[in-house]
Amino acid sequence: MAQQQELKRDLKNRHVQLIAIGGTIGTGLFLGAGKAIQLAGPSIILAYLVVGTALFFVMRALGEMLLSNAGYQSFTDFAVDYIGPWAGYVTGWTYWFCWIMTAMADIIAVGVYVQYWFNIPQWIPAIVCLILLLGLNLLTVRLFGELEFWFALIKVITILALIIVGIVLLIIGFKTHTGTVSVKNLWLNGGLFPNGITGFLLSFQMVVFAFVGVELVGVSAAETANPEKNIPSAINKIPLRILFFYVGALLIILSINPWNQLNASSSPFVATFSLVGIPVAAGIINFVVLTSAASACNSGLFSTSRILYNLSRHHEAPARLGKLNKNRVPSNSLHLSAFVLSLGALLSKLIPGQAFGIVTTISAICFIWVWSIILISHSRYLKKRPDLRKKSIFKAPFAPFINYLVLAFFGFILIIMAIAEETRTALLLSPVWFVLLFILYYVRRKNESNR
């Protein structure tokens, strides 16, 4: 029976690879890119490169830490060991919260996208999608892996099709109603920085949100067969994926469409396929974005349930949340996360206009906390355990210098969010969450010491 209390290592290499791809391609790219392009113009490509590079070093630190101890099931485990129990508690609950916020936005989006075909209240498809995902996640972790495999494959095929079509149009010099398809469109309309350095910097919040989920490889570590091989392989391919899926796709989009012809509130992918005369483009991309939202919700359901399970194992959440069903899946944690996510349908009625903006900003801030904790834990690991560093099979490069550089960069992004009017309110609200968690943690510690 002891074996039943451990998560099942049922994710294969192809699952881990596609979970890593799914984590780096989401609604932030398919939908958020339009707003980011309006802010930064063609320099958005540089913004994706900068943030992507920083997160690659975060992922290398995460990979080294996870492989340094076979008992580590998530980054909350090494946060406890190298920073302290408070760090594991605050980071675990913060990670749960930011995925709940992200998945809420995506479950709302599922309802909106289905309305493209069917005139029904958006909460109905949202709830139906959530129930389906919950049912599949309860059966086996391999089903989660299969879902993410196919969801990610749809994203990959769409971007691949966009890049191939774009290259053909560039070669033949295709003409659209906005002009000739050419790489010159990258600098003809005001240069690479048409809105100056300010516009470039203001785009960073949406770019950060586009990358949330990149650390999912770490959350899935406890259920990965052969983590010593699969985790390094998935992490090392992240730079190539960023170059191909983000930089490649955006280069093509901005070569076909002058940046000032794109609408901030709609998907640049829809605009590009429509522009080249594909009549069913809007329907195809709507389906892709629908699966992308469902994929993000699926990832949210998986990660939040595993974080609750991990918090329960460390006695930082109710013991019943650590219970596994016969398939060795944390069923109670899945049920709780699904219930909280269902409240997202209610949110879409209460604050439809500003809900997505507030949710994405708070989510980005919380993810910056999580990524920073990974880097701080890694820096302390280097000082405390040089023996483990020496025998590591997956050493993070340029550490600890790069850790401090990336942490300073994250601090810089928070300063930009404080300056920008659109993100300032959410930034000022986010400390309430952390203050609440610290209070709960110290009250809990005090109660335990009084027993």
Image: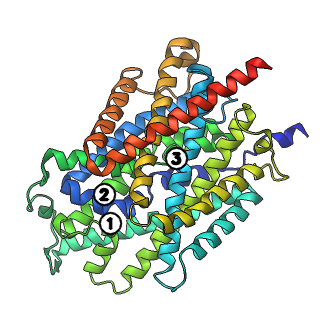
Vertical arrangement, residue 151 with respect to residue 122, above or below: above
Label 2, on which residue?
Answer: 248
Instruction: Give the SS element for disc 3.
Output: helix
Q: Amino acid at mark 2?
A: Gly
Q: Amino acid at mark 3?
A: Cys
Report crowding for label 3: few under 14, some 14 to 19, many 20 or more residues within 10 A (C-alpha).
Answer: many
Q: Tell me how far mark 2 sits from mark 1, CA to CA.
A: 7 Å
**Disc assigned to residue 98:** 3
Report crowding for label 2: few under 14, some 14 to 19, many 20 or more residues within 10 A (C-alpha).
Answer: some
Report crowding for label 1: few under 14, some 14 to 19, many 20 or more residues within 10 A (C-alpha).
Answer: many
Which badge, 2 or 1, is on the more N-terminal residue?
A: 1
Label 1, on which residue?
Answer: 163
Q: Quadrant of the C terminus?
A: top right
Which mark lies nearer to you, 3 or 2? 3
Which mark lies nearer to you, 3 or 1? 3
> Do the residues bearing badges 2 and 1 touch, measured as CB atoms within 8 Å?
yes
Q: Tell me how far mark 3 sits from mark 1, CA to CA.
A: 32 Å
Q: Amino acid at mark 1?
A: Ile
Task: Compare residues 294 and 118 and report the one nearer the observer.
Answer: 118
Q: Is residue 305 left or right of residue 97?
A: right
